[in-house]
Image (spheres, rainbow, N blue to C red):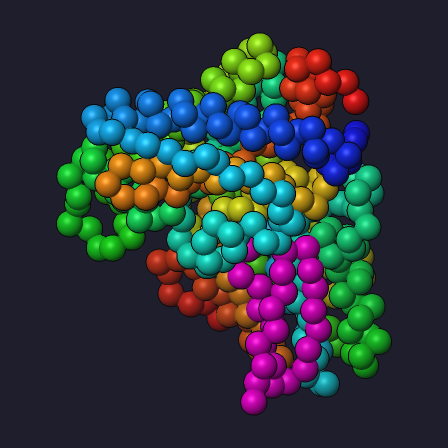
């Protein structure tokens, strides 16, 4: 029986086949799914902010793109994943409101910071569904690495 | 920058009062706009971990209406107001007749009525804030977003996330024939906390 494991906001979880790791309603936050196809190990992080070094209150590693991805990779390697096999799929980073201030750009900055950190760690980004102006619920299927994206009033996307 | 926790208990009381006055103002203005009698309950103020926020307002994936305005002048930051879909529909259809659209979708007319309602409600809170603190408070036009509760809530959660893990949520219940649930979040920039509290003679 496949289990569904829920990842909260500023949270990350790792699981194996045949389980599903999900996070509900990504808005400007970014969901980063990492998958090792050989051992069928999947990990999902739901990060809120781009950069932990810019913020004093940074004890929760999963809150930030930089430390969140590092932590997820560490956790997956501890469970037997190989960094060179890891492939990344990302979603989220929407601009929920058409505001012009810094808050309006946070989604975009989250996506940018995510890509920079993946590159720095040498992890391939193989698919993404980011930006625009709507929320996304995502599910990572640990059996095959498929990444499902559900939005209000839109058909399900599979990355 | 102070941690949200340190200033919470004082700010909590201030916010509660703003919530009280704001809800009163909102009920009065809405009654005038909708030409019906509207009563209100005493607002509930809760301090919540941001990961629990969405679950309080609705299911995380439930579609809700979010209205955001940017606050300018003496206090800067933003303010959000959430309405559950059925409450929003009910209010809107007092202004514009229901459209034939499928469930959960608003027509252009309904959307602009919704913005007007958002304007009135947020304006009511801002004048409460301004009246209580004697500070000048300006507001942008209302921005509207109809989407999953968790996705809309990521916006205030991110803003709170910069300096804490918790957010203060005011729950208001207004009532005409039906119960209208509205949720309100005030997000002053960190510097504005000092200004709000300072204006009330509280120095931290």
Q: Is B99 placed above or below B11 here? A: below
- Position of residue B166 relative to residue B15, above or below, is below
The magenta segment is A1-28
| Image quadrant where residue B198 sits | top right
On the rendered structure, is B71 left or right of B38?
right
Does B197 sit above or below residue B59? above
- State yes or no: residue A92 in magenta: no
Q: Residue at x 79, y 22 (%)?
A: B204
Q: Residue furthest bottom?
A: A1
B2 on left or right of B23: right
Q: Residue at x 40, y 39 (%)?
A: B173
* Residue A100 place in picture, x, y as percent: 53, 30
Decide if residue B203 is in sight here. yes
Q: Is residue A93 visible?
A: no
Q: Residue at x 24, y 41 (%)?
A: B177
Which residue does the image show at 78% across and 73% down from the upper left? A76
User: Is B130 or A80 nearer to us in this picture?
Assistant: B130
Decide: is A82 above or below A24.
below
Q: Position of residue B141 (x, y in %)?
A: 42, 24
Given residues B171 and A16, the one toward you in this image is B171
Q: Answer with left or right where residue B103 lies relative to residue A146.
A: left
Q: Nearer the viewer, residue B34 or A65?
A: B34
Expressed as whole percent of the image width and height from the top left, the position of residue B59 reads 46, 58
Q: Is residue B88 left or right of residue A80?
A: left
* Residue A8: in magenta span: yes
- Location of the N terminus of chain A (image quadrant): bottom right
Residue, far front: B42
Mark count: 0
């Amino acid at each position: 029986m496949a289990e569904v494991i829920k990842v909260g906001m500023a949270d990350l979880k790792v699981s194996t086949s045949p389980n599903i790791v999900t996070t509900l309603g990504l808005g400007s936050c970014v969901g980063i799914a990492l998958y090792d196809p050989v051992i069928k190990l999947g990990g999902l992080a739901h990060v809120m902010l781009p950069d932990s070094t810019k913020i004093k209150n940074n004890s929760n590693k999963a809150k930030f793109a930089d430390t969140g991805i590092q932590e997820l990779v560490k956790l997956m390697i501890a469970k037997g994943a190989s960094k060179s096999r890891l492939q990344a799929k990302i979603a989220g980073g929407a601009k929920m409101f058409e505001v012009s201030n810094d808050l309006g750009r946070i989604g975009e900055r989250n996506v940018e910071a995510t890509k920079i950190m993946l590159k720095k760690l040498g992890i391939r980004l193989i698919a993404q569904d980011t930006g625009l102006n709507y929320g996304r619920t995502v599910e990572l299927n640990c059996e095959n690495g498929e990444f499902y994206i559900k939005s209000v009033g839109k058909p399900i996307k599979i990355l | 920058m102070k941690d949200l926790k340190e200033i919470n208990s004082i700010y909590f009381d201030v916010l509660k009062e703003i919530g009280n006055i704001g809800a009163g103002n909102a009920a009065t203005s809405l009654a005038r706009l909708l030409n019906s009698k509207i009563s209100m309950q005493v607002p509930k103020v809760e301090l919540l971990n941001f990961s629990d926020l969405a679950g309080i307002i609705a299911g995380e994936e439930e579609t809700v209406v979010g209205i955001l305005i940017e606050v300018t002048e003496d206090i800067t930051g933003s303010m959000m107001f959430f309405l559950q879909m059925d409450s929003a529909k009910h209010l809107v259809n007092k202004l514009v007749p229901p459209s034939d659209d499928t469930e959960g979708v608003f027509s252009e007319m309904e959307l602009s009525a919704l913005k007007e309602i958002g304007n009135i409600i947020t304006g009511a809170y801002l004048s409460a804030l301004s009246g209580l603190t004697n500070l000048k408070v300006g507001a942008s036009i209302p921005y509207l977003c109809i989407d999953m509760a968790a996705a809309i809530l990521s916006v205030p959660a991110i803003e709170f996330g910069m300096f804490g893990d918790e957010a203060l949520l005011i729950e208001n219940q207004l009532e005409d024939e039906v119960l209208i649930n509205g949720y309100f979040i005030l997000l002053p920039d960190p510097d504005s906390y000092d200004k709000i509290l300072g204006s009330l003679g509280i120095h931290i």
